[in-house]
Amino acid sequence: MFRLYTSLLLLLLAVSCRQNYSHSISSHELIAIDTTILDDTAVNTFIAPYRDTLEQKMHRIIGFNQKTMSSDRPNSPLSSMVADIMLAEGRKFIDSADIDAEPRPSLAIVNVRGLRTSLNAGDISIRDVFEIMPFENVLTAVLMKGEDVDSLFRHIATIGGDGLAGASFTITRRGAKNIMIDDQPLDSDQMYHVFVPDYLADGGDSYFVFGKAVEKIYTRLKLRDLIIQHIEKLTKQGKQITFDGQARIVDARKAAK
């Protein structure tokens, strides 16, 4: 098995180093990967130290959560907490990088579908955070015109909400109303920083409105790392995970039924 992996690797390296190379497959064989394949002792011995080290790191406890936090629309504890973290770190990045001479109103958005599971009550391990955020998404600062931010909120209204921080609004049958950013009404003539995962900045989950961005800055800050650092910081301060509990998005359509 080990020789097979080595041969495949050498083949890939050879192919990648050649120019204008084309090929075709003349024959193939399906090889089932199941319990009939015996373990390779040499391979197991080779990877064991790395596997054991990784397992030890993944099981490290970094904090404690009193109550299970889920991710759902229009609001949820987990999506609100992650959005809060993104907003705080995004603002710090803009300030430290000295990107703007003047501070701009800002908000953060995280797609609830990007948070793959709940954060259960009890001890929190590194593994728990990886299960919530298994992707390599990085924090992205998107500079947008106010009129395009209005379109952004209209999109969030059509999907019934998403994780939001630094802003609030109401979903009505006519779209997004009462949009507030940094405690001020949305101004079409203002410029805003919107902090999002790079997946959304690139149009994922139908966030095509980010294609109208004036500027996109892809930081090297992985969202998963930011969540871990936030929990570790709270733990060092003797605090547990909390969020303000306020509804950032009100779905008036449900109340009207």
Image (tube, rainbow, N blue to C red):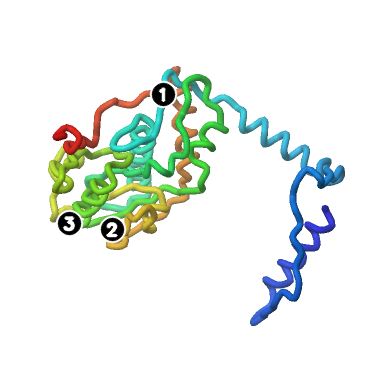
Mark 2 → mark 3, Cα distance in angstroms:
11 Å
Residue shown at the point (17%, 56%) measured from the top left = 147
Mark 1 → mark 2, Cα distance in angstroms:
33 Å
Q: Position of residue 67 (x, y in %)?
A: 42, 20
SS for callout 3? helix
Q: Position of residue 170 (x, y in %)?
A: 17, 39
Hey, what amino acid is under mark 1? Ile
Dividing the picture into quadrants, the one containing residue 50 is: top right
Hey, what amino acid is under mark 3? Glu
Quarter that holds the C terminus:
top left
Mark 2 or 3: the one toward you? 2
Q: Earlier in the sequence, mark 1 or mark 2?
A: 2
Residue 241, which numbered label?
1
Q: Position of residue 30 (x, y in %)?
A: 74, 60
Residue shown at the point (32%, 54%) measured from the top left = 142
Name, please, the residue furthest toward the right.
41
Q: Residues within 10 Å of mark 1 (few under 14, many from 20)?
A: some
SS for callout 1? loop
Q: Which residue is mark 3?
A: 147
Vertically, is 59 above or below 154? above
Vertically, is 128 above or below 209? above
Dividing the picture into quadrants, the one containing residue 248 is: top left
Vertically, is 123 above or below 41? above
Mark 1 → mark 3, Cα distance in angstroms:
35 Å
Residue 209, which numbered label?
2
224 sits left or right of 33 in the view = left
